[in-house]
Amino acid sequence: MFCYDLFVGVLSNILFVILLVIIFWIIGIIININRLNRAKTFFNSEDDSKVMIYISAFTSPSVVSRRVVNVVEFDIAIRLRDSLKQLSSKHKAFQVLLTIGEMIGRETKNIDSDIRFSETNPIINQLSENSIICIGEPISNQVSKYYMQNAYFIYSEVSKCYQHLEDGKYNDIKGGNISIIEKIIHGKQMILLIHGTNEYDTLKSVEYLIENWEKLYKDYSEKEFAVII
């Protein structure tokens, strides 16, 4: 009788632990679903449209393609792309849920993104993608230059410095180097302009976005914003 009671007690404890693990597993999945949905809202990928990341490109007669890219920007763009992908994929439990969702026809997709090189010639028409992230200053990133025309922060090729909109006109930003993140909404299109005084200031802006997009979402949600890091 004693052995039976001991067995029942041990089994009850094991079942209780298993139940707790399942509960925490479900809570973890729910947290990750909510985080992924917040990211989709912030990066304008709620309809599962691909997030396009554009980096600077330069013309060079010394290479076959006549176009070269900034290595610093390319590396940080890869980090940004991978961070978007890992919003859910880093959790095995969440991947199990995605698989189950696919099987029953209720698929919850990850954020898909791709890296593209900016055109080297001026862009005259709005791009077709709904979610665009521009990395790099307008001097070398034509996509940034196109969407920066009516931005809060612009780069003046006359003053050779950044300017900000104040009382309906642009004024020079005095001081040292700056890093900028600006979100612009054009109808259904969302554009994130990420740039700085030089490539390392741009790097700082992208790193801030990777680490703090949830804070920016909490502060601004789907609204436009412009911040100096």
Image (cartoon, helix red, strand yellow):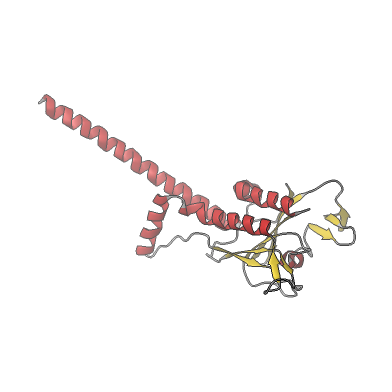
**Number of disc labels:** 0
**Left or right, 148 with reference to 35:** right
Write the residue at 73% across / 54% down.
Answer: 199
Can you give x and y, in whole percent of width and height, for residue 56 in the image? 71, 64
**Left or right, 167 with reference to 208:** right
Write the residue at 39% across / 46% down.
Answer: 26
Q: Is residue 151 above or below residue 13?
A: below
Can you give x and y, in whole percent of width and height, for residue 201 in the image? 73, 50
Which quarter of the figure has residue 190? bottom right
Q: Is residue 20 above or below residue 64?
A: above
Residue farthest along the left direction in this orientation = 1
Which quarter of the figure has residue 163? bottom right
Please say whether residue 226 is visible from this viewpoint.
no
Write the residue at 83% across / 46% down.
Answer: 176
Can you give x and y, in whole percent of width and height, for residue 77 in the image? 62, 58
Q: Quick one: 118 or 227, which is closer to the camera?
A: 118
Q: Quick one: 80 or 217, which is closer to the camera?
A: 80
Residue farthest along the front direction in this orientation = 62
Q: Quick one: 57 or 62, which is closer to the camera?
A: 62
Q: Quick one: 170 or 115, which is closer to the camera?
A: 115
For the N terminus, which image quadrant?
Answer: top left
Residue farthest along the top direction in this orientation = 2
Which quarter of the figure has residue 140? bottom right
Please say whether residue 6 is visible from this viewpoint.
yes
Write the residue at 34% across / 38% down.
Answer: 20
Can you give x and y, in whole percent of width and height, for residue 87 in the image? 51, 52
